[in-house]
Structure formats: structure tokens, C-alpha cells
Image (spheres, coloured by chain):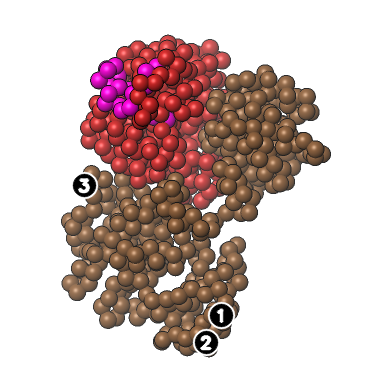
Chain colours: A brown, B red
């Protein structure tokens, strides 16, 4: 779960990392007074805000109101700006980069640092980025900080501040169950302070049971995706016109790929996971119909999820409405005969294998 | 032979009194697994499907000599359960539980590695060695004893492929589902190494998916250390960047982890990569 910049900065501050003074408003009228020059920053969960005109300076209150009014409501790459952060402007001497993420290969945290802050870290040459996997049984130690400080080449006056921020950023990861904590840029000001100019924090959504305080923040989801999430169904909207219901992430992806091989394109990805509850299947099917695909493809390999459970749920969802969309059903595994019989009677297009199902669904979608 | 689990496996089911634990302890026994005990704090002395239930893993190990555990405990309590098993002397811990926080996975895996314990998962379907034993939730009916070793990040997609292999008239030595989370206890490489050493295994099937670089690392390992033929399937060729495709680990982030890069690496290592999952048996020849 991605956090807005101002929420992320609140998290950094809570763990002792300096951030600029600031406040958030939802309308320009809420800006009463500012003390000195500020930056006004759109709060949206997407990168490239600056280039899109979502980050602008202001010198006084009148100016700030005008700028904020211009940014509020702005559509930045599909995200509407509902809030702006008004922040004291920093006098920048140098910009650095710090980030901590998950290192899948080392099965640990990965600490990243670069003296070339302020730009997309992807465009920084590799030899200008320090990558330190942190052994979980060793933890982040002062020798790690010393290595970062040395690599950054910061003056003595800032070395202690930087080391402190490094330690604190690892704390943010561990204590908040974050999967990403990034400060870019980490600013060294003209008066010698080290302070977080921007902040990106992503919380592991599997760990929300330990952090109920984050549950109130909205996620980067379409309305249907949000609805699916409430029902605990994995639902992803794509840009084709075939709706795919399958069980298990791998099988669902393989189904999408197979459709593609026959020239079709999936518009919705819906993974039932390991449910055996007809009510959940029913809700999934209703969501699918709401997404309005041209064809629905059901591909189930039943194990925990039994085939007749799927059939029952699908039929219940369609009860009482005239569903015109063609449905291709391929059902295999536990209780497959029962499931097939139920669906066959309802006029669905049967398919025996994954490839055949993908081919039939693609043909229907191109009609 | 076979790898990871066999007729010497003596299994504890952690969380045996829940719906999943109850159902799968029975299914594992029907597969031939020696399920010697279950655990459920506060329910010691009870029994499930005639399997004795203990309050702790240590008690269960002491009474039964168990060496393997299968964890069905819900995510908030799963780290505790896995560490308890490791501390009680269990040698192979299979974590079926999904949605384990990644920090918990990192902790459990680090401890297991330090102690020389194998952790499979989290979020995995488990391991099946047909004719010998199964630990996990893979469906019993699809397997047949044979000489194909299967290692996969997926659950149901593995069933699809195993089923196709069986219908083709071939069988499996062992099938290992390593799980689709970002941090897993066991990697492709760990299992490939075991398959290379295993006498029963003649050919290997690797089922990967988008996200991370485990498939690329496996490809490099295959080109250097694996002499047995390998066939692969990679799911997610058509997945758009930045969307998490069901598994926590299945995401193309910052241009890395694409199916294209994985397929290219595997093919360069001499691996035949199937276009459709059901093409795998034919490529096995």
C-alpha cells in the first residue's frame, strides 16, 4: 500500500528523520498564513508530478492560494489531485538518494544510497549506486552507515546526521512493515542540515493486521478493484475485452497468456484463489459482469476450490438477469463432472483443455 | 529416492484443528504420508482423524520422533509456528499459509538457513513424492510415480502441468511448489541441485512466473551444473508492468522481472520453454 508523500513524511518524522515543516489542504481557502517561501506539491500516488506541473513554488499567501487552486483538481497521469502539501522551501546545496527495499535474491533488506539524488534512481549509473544487502541476523550496524557516508562523500559536518538518518530509515522498514522506504532527494541545505525533500513509503498490505492505522488510507485501485478487495478477491483491470475467472495466480496468468496466443486480449483478471465458498464465487461473477466484458472465460483447476462450488456460485450470480455475454467454461479437477453438468445445462460453451478454452474465448471476442 | 519428502517423512500438521488442517491431514494420509501428530495450542490431548493433537511442537516431536512439519496456521501466528518448529528440531518446514508479512518471511528464512533447516514456502502448495509421501495441499489424483522432477512457483498451474504429464503417460519423482511470494525459504536452485543428485529423477520441469530474477538465476545454475534435460514454462508473458498479478511476487517492477527476460535466459541455458502449459509433456519427449 503506497502512502501519500505527506503521510510518508509523517512516518519518517515519527522515527526521527527530519522533514520540512508543512501542512495539507484540500482547498485554497484553507491557506491562512505562511512564513516565507514554500513549495506546493500535489498529493497523488504516481511519479512524475513535477514534470506534470504538480509541484510549484509560491512566495506569499496570495501567491500560495493561487498556485494551490491551480494544482487542486489537476489530473496527473490519471490521478486527480485532492490534496496539496504546502511545505517550507529548502535552500538546496546538494541532493542525495537513500532507499531501502526487499532483496528477493538475498532474502533480506537491501539498502541503497547514491550521491546523485533528485533524479529517477533508474537513470543513475550503477557505479553511482551503493547496494548493501542487510543480513537479517546481523541487522543494520554502524559499519553499514560508515560505508554509506564514505560512498556519499559528504563533509564531516553532515556525516553524523546522514548516519542517523540511515539507521532511522531501516527502522521505518522494520517497525512499520514497509516494503519500500525511499528518500529522494535527501537534501543537504545551504545551512548544513540534512532533511528529507521527498518521501516514498509502501506498507506491506499483508502486515496491516499489525498496523490498523494505515487501513483508512485509500489505495491506488479502480472502483471495481476496490470493491473486489473488500470481498478479498484478486481482481485486476487490463485493457482487453475478455473477462477471465481462474483460481490461483499462476493459472490465471497462464490463461491470459494462452488467450493472447490466439489473438484475444484479457480485460479483467479475477483470481478466486483457494476459496470453496459458493457465495464468494457468486460475488466474483457479479463483479465480472459489472466489468462488462465481451466474453467470459472460466478456467478452474479444482483442488481446494471444488468444481461444483464454482458452478453453483456462477449460476447464482446469473439468476434472474438475462446475461447475453457468451461464457466459455473449462472445468477440471475435484467434482468436475458435477460442475460441468450444472454449467452445461445453463448454455455455456464447454472446453476440455486450457488451450481449447483460450481459443474459443478469443474467437468469441473477435466476432 | 525422490527429494525433500519420502517414506522416511514423519509429519506434524501445525494448525490441525482448523478446516484446512483437518481436511489436508486426512488427504495427506490417503496419499501415503505418515502423519504422526498435530498441534494446536490449548487442544493437546484431543485427536483429529485419529491423529493425536499436542499443545506444542516440542511435545509432538518428543512423543513421535517427527522430522517434518506442515504449517496451516493463519498468517498473524505463522511466524511463531514456523520458528517453534525450527526450535523443536524439525528438519523440513512446509509453510502453506498465504499472506505472511514479508518481514516475517525474512526472519523465518534467516533463522532456518543459520540452523541448516529447509523451509518451503510460505504461500506454497507443498511437496509430493508419488508412491511415498505428500506434505501440503496438492491434489492426490493428478500424480503418478515416475522420473520427472517438477519445481514450481505456482499452485494450480503446477496441478495443470502435472496432470498433463500424467495424462501423457509419464510420472513424477517429486513435485515441489516453492511458492510465489517475494521471499521464499527454498529457491529453484536449491531444488534443481537436489534433482541433479537424485537417481530417480531423469528429467526436470521448471514452472516460473514474472517478477524477481529467480528464473534467470536458475538458468545460470542450469547451464553450469545441471546435466539432466530441463523443460520450462513461464507464466505472465502478457502481464502489464506495475500490476501485481495475484501472487505478491508476480509483478514487473521498474522494467525487471519480465517473462521475456526469463525465457531468453532459460533458452540460452539449453532449456526448452513451452508456449502453452499443456505443451510441457511433449517437450519432455
Rendered residue at 29%/16% (across/down): B64
Residue B250 in the magenta stretch? The answer is no
Q: Are marks 2 and 1 in contact (CB under 8 Å)?
A: no
Q: Looking at the image, is mark 3 or mark 2 earlier in the sequence?
A: 2
As rendered, which of B226 and B82 lies closer to the eye? Answer: B82
The tag on residue A63 is: 2
Residue A31: where, in percent of width, then height? 51, 82
Q: Which residue is mark 1?
A: A28
The residue identified by callout 3 is A138
Whether residue B211 is visible to the viewer of this picture, yes or no, is no
Instruction: Magenta stretch: give its range.
Output: B51-72
- B88 up-or-down from A111: above or below: above
Marks 3 and 2, Cα distance to the nearest angstrom? 51 Å
Q: Position of residue A219 (x, y in %)?
A: 53, 56
Which callout, 1 or 3, points at the residue further toward the start of the chain?
1
Residue B64 tag number: none
Amino acid at each position: 500500500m503506497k502512502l501519500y508523500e505527506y503521510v510518508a513524511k509523517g512516518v519518517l518524522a515519527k522515527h526521527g528523520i527530519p522533514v520540512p515543516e508543512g501542512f495539507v489542504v484540500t482547498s485554497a481557502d484553507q491557506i491562512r498564513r505562511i512564513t516565507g517561501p514554500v513549495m506546493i506539491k500535489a498529493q497523488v500516488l504516481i511519479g512524475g508530478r513535477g514534470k506534470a506541473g504538480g509541484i510549484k513554488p509560491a512566495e506569499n499567501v496570495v501567491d500560495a492560494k493561487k498556485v494551490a487552486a491551480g494544482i487542486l483538481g489537476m489530473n496527473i497521469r490519471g490521478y486527480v489531485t485532492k490534496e496539496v502539501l504546502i511545505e517550507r522551501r529548502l535552500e538546496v546545496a546538494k541532493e542525495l538518494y537513500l532507499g531501502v527495499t526487499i532483496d528477493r535474491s538475498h532474502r533480506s533488506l537491501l539498502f541503497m544510497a547514491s550521491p546523485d539524488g533528485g533524479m529517477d534512481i533508474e537513470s543513475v549509473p550503477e557505479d553511482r549506486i551503493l547496494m548493501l544487502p542487510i543480513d537479517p541476523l546481523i541487522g543494520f550496524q554502524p559499519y553499514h552507515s560508515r560505508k554509506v557516508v564514505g560512498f556519499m562523500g559528504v563533509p564531516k559536518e553532515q556525516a553524523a546526521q546522514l548516519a542517523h538518518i540511515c539507521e532511522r530509515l531501516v527502522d521505518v522498514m522494520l517497525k512499520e512493515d514497509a516494503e519500500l522506504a525511499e528518500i529522494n532527494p535527501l537534501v543537504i541545505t545551504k545551512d548544513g542540515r540534512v532533511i528529507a525533500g521527498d518521501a516514498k513509503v509502501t506498507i506491506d498490505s499483508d502486515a496491516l493486521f499489525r498496523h490498523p492505522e494505515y487501513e483508512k488510507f485509500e489505495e491506488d485501485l479502480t472502483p471495481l478493484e476496490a470493491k473486489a478487495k473488500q470481498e478479498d478477491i484478486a481482481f485486476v483491470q487490463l485493457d482487453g475485452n475478455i473477462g477471465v475467472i481462474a483460481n490461483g495466480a499462476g493459472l490465471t496468468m497462464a490463461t491470459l497468456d494462452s488467450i493472447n496466443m490466439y489473438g484475444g486480449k484479457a480485460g479483467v483478471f479475477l483470481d478466486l484463489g483457494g476459496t470453496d465458498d459458493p457465495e464468494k464465487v457468486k460475488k466474483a461473477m457479479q463483479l465480472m459482469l459489472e466489468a462488462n466484458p465481451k466474453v467470459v472465460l472460466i478456467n478452474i483447476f479444482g483442488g481446494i476450490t471444488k468444481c461444483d462450488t464454482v458452478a453453483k456460485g456462477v449460476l447464482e450470480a446469473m439468476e434472474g438477469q438475462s446475461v447475453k455475454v457468451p461464457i466459455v467454461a473449462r472445468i477440471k479437477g475435484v467434482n468436475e463432472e458435477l460442475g460441468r453438468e450444472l454449467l452445461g445445462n445453463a448454455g455455456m460453451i464447454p472446453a476440455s483443455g486450457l488451450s481449447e478454452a483460450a481459443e474459443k474465448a478469443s474467437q468469441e471476442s473477435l466476432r | 529416492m525422490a527429494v525433500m519428502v519420502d517414506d522416511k517423512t514423519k509429519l506434524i500438521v501445525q494448525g490441525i484443528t482448523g478446516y484446512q488442517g483437518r481436511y489436508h491431514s486426512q488427504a495427506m494420509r490417503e496419499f501415503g504420508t505418515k502423519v504422526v501428530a498435530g498441534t494446536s495450542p490449548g487442544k493437546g490431548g484431543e485427536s483429529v482423524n485419529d491423529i493425536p493433537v499436542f499443545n506444542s511442537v516440542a511435545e509432538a516431536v518428543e512423543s513421535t520422533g517427527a522430522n517434518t512439519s506442515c504449517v496451516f496456521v493463519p498468517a498473524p501466528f505463522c511466524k511463531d509456528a514456523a520458528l517453534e518448529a525450527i526450535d523443536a528440531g524439525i528438519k523440513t518446514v512446509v509453510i502453506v499459509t498465504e499472506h505472511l508479512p514479508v518481514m516475517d518471511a525474512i526472519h523465518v528464512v534467516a533463522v532456518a538457513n543459520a540452523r541448516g533447516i529447509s523451509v518451503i514456502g510460505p504461500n506454497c502448495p507443498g511437496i509430493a513424492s508419488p508412491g511415498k509421501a505428500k506434505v501440503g495441499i496438492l491434489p492426490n489424483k493428478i500424480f503418478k510415480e515416475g522420473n520427472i522432477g517438477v519445481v514450481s512457483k505456482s499452485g494450480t498451474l503446477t496441478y495443470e502441468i502435472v496432470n498433463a504429464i500424467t495424462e501423457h503417460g509419464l510420472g513424477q519423482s517429486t513435485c515441489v511448489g516453492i511458492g510465489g511470494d517475494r521471499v521464499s525459504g527454498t529457491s529453484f536452485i536449491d531444488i534443481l541441485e537436489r534433482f541433479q543428485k537424485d537417481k530417480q529423477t531423469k528429467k526436470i520441469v521448471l514452472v516460473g512466473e514474472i517478477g524477481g530474477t529467480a528464473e534467470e538465476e536458475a538458468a545460470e545454475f542450469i547451464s553450469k551444473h545441471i546435466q539432466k534435460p530441463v523443460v520450462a514454462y513461464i507464466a505472465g508473458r502478457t502481464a502489464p508492468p506495475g500490476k501485481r498479478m495475484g501472487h505478491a511476487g508476480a509483478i514487473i517492477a521498474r522494467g525487471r522481472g519480465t517473462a521475456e527476460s526469463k525465457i531468453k535466459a532459460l533458452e540460452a541455458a539449453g532449456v526448452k520453454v513451452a508456449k502453452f502449459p499443456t505443451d510441457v509433456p511433449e517437450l519432455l519427449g
